């Protein structure tokens, strides 16, 4: 079979955002990705690490991490006020540990809007929506600039699986290319920890995502 894998969003529309958040309450494989990223934070970073999430969306990963690690502080970055409002509701009683920052990752100056330097930068299902490989490469480059030596970058995002006959939107591309872009950004030994919900023959837009990690 062949076809096209991609999606269009209206992430500044509050009604669309609420409906999207309700449709994508994390499933077990998605919780597995959250746990992989949390494990990397706890393995690589200091106990009281400051974590920056790019594209927080409805706040599901933020809540998951903050519930399980009582020591980290958190900065939740998103370009959508509608998503930031939903994330505040999701994170609820844990919001005192979170700084919410409105910034657009397409703009090269987004690091200037951060409240402080992060020890870890994490993201899930967000960077592919920037539109293509160059935009993702730009974010990887800014992450390398912002992180301290030993800092962690963990990106769980949709990818184009090897061996597929389907066309994918430009922001979904092969794991090997992600690793190449991370090396070009300055990360020495990037790697992929997992390919989750793989589907080569008949994929949906919600399948085929990887957990990519790199240490500065």
Image (spheres, rainbow, N blue to C red):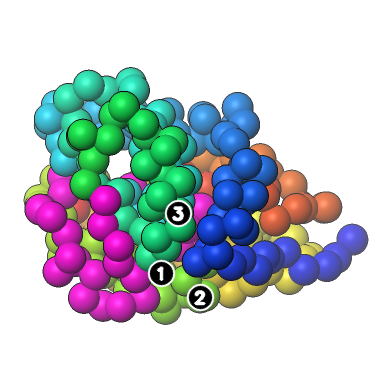
Q: Is residue 31 left or right of residue 59?
A: right
Q: Which mark is residue 6?
A: none
Q: Residue at x 66, y 43 (%)?
A: 23
Residue placed most toward the observer, 98 or 5: 98
Q: In the displayed structure, does residue 10 sit left or right of residue 177?
A: right
Task: Compare marks 1 and 3 and give the one earlier in the sequence.
Answer: 3
Residue 111 at x, y percent in the picture? 19, 66
- Mark 3 or mark 2, earlier in chain: 3
Q: Name the residue under label 2.
A: 132
Residue 5 visible, this angle:
yes
Residue 82 on the magenta span: no
Left or right: 116 with respect to 170? left
Tell me, yes or no, whether the two marked residues, 3 and 2, touch with CB atoms within 8 Å.
no
Circles 1 and 2 in contact, beta carbons < 8 Å: yes
Q: Distance between the residues labelled 1 and 2?
A: 7 Å
Q: Quadrant of residue 140?
A: bottom left
Label 2 Cα neighbours within 10 Å, binned few <14 / some 14-19 / many ≥20: some
Q: Quadrant of residue 26?
A: top right
Q: Quadrant of the N terminus?
A: bottom right
Q: Considering the numbered disc 3 on the image, is that residue within a helix, a strand or a loop?
A: helix
Q: How crowded is mark 3: few (under 14 residues within 10 Å), some or many (20 or more)?
A: many
Horizontally, residue 166 falls left or right of residue 116, namely right
Residue carrying label 3: 83
Q: Distance between the residues labelled 1 and 3?
A: 21 Å
Per the rendered image, the range of residues in magenta is: 100-128
Measured as percent of width and height from the top left, residue 87 is found at 41, 44
Tell me what residue is drawn at x 70 percent, y 56 percent: 205
**Rendered position, 161 above or below 207:** below
Which mark is nearer the camera, 1 or 3?
Answer: 3
Kindly identify which residue carries mark 1: 136
Question: What residue is shown at x 50% (from left), y 66% (from top)?
Answer: 12
């Amino acid at each position: 079979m062949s076809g096209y894998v991609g999606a269009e969003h209206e992430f500044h529309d509050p009604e669309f955002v609420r409906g999207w958040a309700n449709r994508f309450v994390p499933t077990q494989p998605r919780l597995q990705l959250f746990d992989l990223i949390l494990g990397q934070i706890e393995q690589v970073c200091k106990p009281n690490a400051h974590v920056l999430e790019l594209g927080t969306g409805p706040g599901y990963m933020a809540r998951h991490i903050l519930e399980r690690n009582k020591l980290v502080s958190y900065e939740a970055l998103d370009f959508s006020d509608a998503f930031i409002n939903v994330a505040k509701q999701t994170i609820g009683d844990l919001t005192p540990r979170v700084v919410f920052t409105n910034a657009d990752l397409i703009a090269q100056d987004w690091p200037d809007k951060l409240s402080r330097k992060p020890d870890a930068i994490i993201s899930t299902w967000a960077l592919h929506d920037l539109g293509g490989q160059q935009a993702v490469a730009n974010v990887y480059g800014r992450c390398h600039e912002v992180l301290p030596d030993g800092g962690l970058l963990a990106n769980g995002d949709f990818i184009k699986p090897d061996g597929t006959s389907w066309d994918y939107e430009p922001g979904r591309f092969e794991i090997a290319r992600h690793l190449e872009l991370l090396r070009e950004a300055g990360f020495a030994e990037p790697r992929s920890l997992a390919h989750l919900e793989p589907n080569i023959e008949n994929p949906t837009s919600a399948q085929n995502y990887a957990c990519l990690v790199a240490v500065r």
